Image: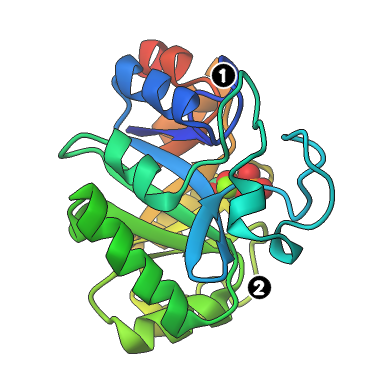
């Protein structure tokens, strides 16, 4: 079962900072997950809509200029990183899950994504693009059918996986609250991978492994790797 560091090793270092991602890489994770917001023609890595919780700034990320955002402290005197900086931390073979929290324009987002891949040297097939906003993912899929898409969901719908079929997604990433063996089996029977977020307790990790989950997102990657062997 694969272990993705959720916002980096975010129990040990400030979430979504290069420090958190470097610690995750050092722990030997299979992948890192991070939250992306488009600001003009760039992509910055921060979870919340607002700057207040995780930085010394205030207000909405999308109202700010990149220059201002880059002056802020995201904890331990770490800046809010750019997409290319985070992709650069992941060595070859390590997967990167970009979770899109906000985008202004799919075309400009893809242009920024391309630039980040070139600047970091990260192989595109080692990148997975996820979001709760399936409209954005659908638009990306139309323009770039070969990109790896992961559909995020926090529900187990009556019509189960009908929402996923047009995408032929790389994975379905489901909330721990709705994870159950039948759901995981249904996802895998369709030929998709089943990932679960956010899993920090060893007993949950072991149960999901037993149920056949392909991977988890965890704030405690070192613990997960030790627990899962
Ligand atoms: O990508 C999985 C997980 O990160 C989704 O929820 O709010 O932690 O970004 P959130
Ligand atoms: Mg996320």
Front-most of residues 83 and 212: 83
Q: Residue at x 36, y 65 (%)?
A: 113
Instruction: Identify the residue under disc 2.
Output: 158
State which mark lies toward you, 1 or 2.
1
Q: Is mark 1 within 8 Å of ligand 2?
A: no
Residue 108 percent across, percent down from the top left? 45, 79
Colour approach in the figure: rainbow
Could you tell me which residue is drawn at 53 percent across and 36 percent down?
A: 7
Write the residue at 41% across / 80% down: 140
Percent position of residue 67, x then y: 59, 53
Give the residue pinned by disc 1: 13
Local SS, label 2: loop
Q: Earlier in the sequence, mark 1 or mark 2?
A: 1
**In the rendered image, which quarter is residue 191 located in?**
bottom left
Residue 176 location, quadrant: top right
**Quadrant of the rendered image containing residue 188:** bottom left
* Gap between marks 1 and 2 measured at Cα: 39 Å
The structure residue drawn at horizontal position 53% and vertical position 78%, both measured from the top left corner, is: 136
- Taking the image as drawn, is residue 61 in sight? yes
Q: Position of residue 63 (x, y in %)?
A: 75, 65
User: Would you place residue 119 above or below residue 71 in this image?
Assistant: below
Residue 212 visible in this rendered orientation of the protein:
no
Mark 1 surroundings: few (<14), some (14-19) or many (≥20) residues within 10 A: many
Residue 48 location, x and y as percent?
72, 49
Q: Vertical placement of 30 versus 197: above or below? A: above
Q: Identify the secondary structure beneath mark 1.
A: loop
- Residue found at the far bottom of this picture: 142
- Frontmost residue, 59 versus 11: 59
Q: Would you say 224 lies left or right of 61 here?
A: left
């Amino acid at each position: 079962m694969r272990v993705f560091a959720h916002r980096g090793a975010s129990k040990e270092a400030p979430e979504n900072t290069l420090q958190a991602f470097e610690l995750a890489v050092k722990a030997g994770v299979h992948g890192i997950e991070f939250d992306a917001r488009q600001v003009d023609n760039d992509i910055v890595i921060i979870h919340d809509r607002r700057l207040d919780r995780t930085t010394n700034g205030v207000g909405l990320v999308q109202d700010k200029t990149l220059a201002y955002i880059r002056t802020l402290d995201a904890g331990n005197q770490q800046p809010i990183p750019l997409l290319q900086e985070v992709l650069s931390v992941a060595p070859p073979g390590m997967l990167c899950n970009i979770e899109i929290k906000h985008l202004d324009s799919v075309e400009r987002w893809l242009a920024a994504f391309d630039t980040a891949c070139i600047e970091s040297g990260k192989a595109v097939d080692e990148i997975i693009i996820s979001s709760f906003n399936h409209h954005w993912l659908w638009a990306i899929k139309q323009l770039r059918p070969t990109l790896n898409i992961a559909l995020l969901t926090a529900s187990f719908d009556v019509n189960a996986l009908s929402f996923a079929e047009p995408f032929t997604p790389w994975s379905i990433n489901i909330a721990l609250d709705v994870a159950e063996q039948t759901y995981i089996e249904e996802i895998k029977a369709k030929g998709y991978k089943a990932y679960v977020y956010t899993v920090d307790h060893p007993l949950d990790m072991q149960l999901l492994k037993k149920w056949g989950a392909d991977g988890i997102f965890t704030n405690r990657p070192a613990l997960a790797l030790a627990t899962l062997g």
